[in-house]
Image: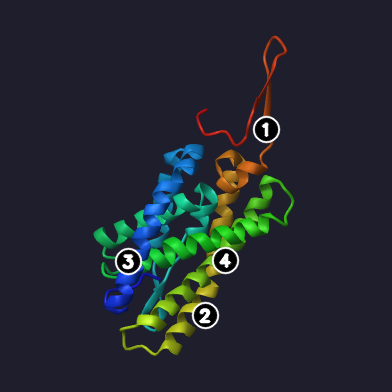
C-alpha cells in the first residue's frame, strides 16, 4: 500500500505531511505512559516484526501494491500512541533506506498506515473487547477483527487521498476497485497473523499486552510471616 512519488499532487502531499508531523509530535508526548507500562523493548520488537512483514509486497493492480500493515497489531500490543510511533519509524526507514514508498509521499504513507491503520485497528479492538467476556483470551479475537477492519480502512483512506489530489493517470474507479477489493482479502491475512502473534504473547505475558492489562487479575503475594502484598497487574513494567 506504499504510495510512490508522483501519485499525489503537491498540495495533498504537503497537507498529509503536516498532518503526519502533528500526529507524530502528539504521539511522542502521549506515548510516555504506554512506554512506562511495557518499556521500550517490546515497542522495538514490534517495530522490527512489522518492518520485516511489510517488506513483502505484491501487486494488486492499477499501479499499486499490497502488503500486511501491522497497525492494529502495534496498537493492541503497545498502545495507540506508541503504535503510531512504531509505524512512523518503520515507514521512515523503509522510505529513506530501502526506497519503499516515495519521499514526497512519506506524509501520506504515515497518515494512511501509521495513523488511520493504527487508530482504526485500536478502536475496533477496544469496541469488541467491550462486549466480550472480561478475560485476556478475549484480546485475540478483538485484535483479529481490528486487523481485519484496519486494512480496508487504510485502503479507503488512500483512495480518498487520491480522489482529493491524485496526480497519476489512473481512473479513480479502477484504483478504488483494486485497492479496496484486494485489501478486503489482505485484511483476512492481517487478521490471522495479528491473532497468532497476540495469542502467543497473551498466553505467556498478558501483562505486556496494552489492551489486556486491565483484564489481568492482580497478583497477591504472601511472605513467610503471612503478610499479604498485592501487585497490581497494570503496574508499570519493572516496578
Label 3 – label 4 distance at C-alpha: 26 Å
SS at mark 3?
Answer: helix
Counting other residues with Cα less than 10 Å from the Cα at mark 2, is it few (<14), some (14-19), or many (20 or more)? some
In the image, residue 143 above or below residue 221: below
Q: Are marks 4 and 2 in contact (CB under 8 Å)?
A: no
Please tell me which residue lies in front, 100 or 56: 100
Please tell me which residue lies in front, 98 or 95: 95
Which residue is label 3 attached to? 17
Which sits earlier in the primary sequence, circle 3 or circle 4?
3
Nearest to viewer (mark 3 / mark 1): 3
Which residue is label 1 attached to? 218
Nearest to viewer (mark 4 / mark 1): 1
Which sits earlier in the primary sequence, circle 4 or circle 2?
4
Label 2 – label 3 distance at C-alpha: 27 Å
Nearest to viewer (mark 3 / mark 4): 3
Which residue is label 2 attached to? 181
Counting other residues with Cα less than 10 Å from the Cα at mark 1, is it few (<14), some (14-19), or many (20 or more)? some
Seen at 68% across and 48% down, the residue is: 137
SS at mark 2?
Answer: helix
Which sits earlier in the primary sequence, circle 4 or circle 1?
4
Amino acid at each position: 500500500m506504499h504510495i510512490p512519488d508522483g501519485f499525489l499532487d503537491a498540495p495533498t502531499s504537503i497537507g498529509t505531511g503536516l498532518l503526519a508531523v502533528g500526529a507524530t509530535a502528539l504521539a511522542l508526548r502521549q506515548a510516555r505512559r504506554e512506554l512506562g507500562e511495557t518499556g521500550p523493548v517490546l515497542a522495538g520488537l514490534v517495530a522490527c516484526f512489522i518492518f520485516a512483514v511489510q517488506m513483502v509486497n505484491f501487486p494488486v493492480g492499477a499501479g499499486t501494491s499490497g502488503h500486511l500493515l501491522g497497525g492494529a497489531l502495534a496498537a493492541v500490543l503497545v498502545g495507540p500512541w506508541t503504535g503510531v510511533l512504531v509505524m512512523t519509524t518503520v515507514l521512515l526507514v523503509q522510505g529513506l533506506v530501502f526506497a519503499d514508498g516515495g519521499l514526497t509521499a512519506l506524509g501520506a504513507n504515515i497518515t494512511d498506515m501509521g495513523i488511520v491503520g493504527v487508530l482504526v485497528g485500536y478502536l475496533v479492538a477496544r469496541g469488541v473487547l467491550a462486549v466480550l467476556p472480561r478475560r485476556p483470551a478475549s484480546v485475540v479475537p478483538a485484535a483479529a477483527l481490528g486487523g481485519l477492519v484496519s486494512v480496508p480502512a487504510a485502503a479507503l483512506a488512500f483512495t480518498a487521498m487520491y480522489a482529493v489530489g491524485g496526480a497519476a493517470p489512473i481512473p479513480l474507479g479502477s484504483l478504488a476497485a483494486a485497492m479496496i477489493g484486494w485489501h478486503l482479502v489482505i485484511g483476512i491475512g492481517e487478521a490471522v497473523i495479528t491473532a497468532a502473534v497476540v495469542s502467543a504473547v497473551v498466553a505467556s505475558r498478558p501483562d505486556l499486552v496494552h489492551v489486556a492489562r486491565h483484564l489481568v487479575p492482580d497478583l497477591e503475594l504472601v511472605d513467610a510471616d503471612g503478610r499479604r502484598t498485592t501487585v497490581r497487574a497494570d503496574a508499570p513494567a519493572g516496578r
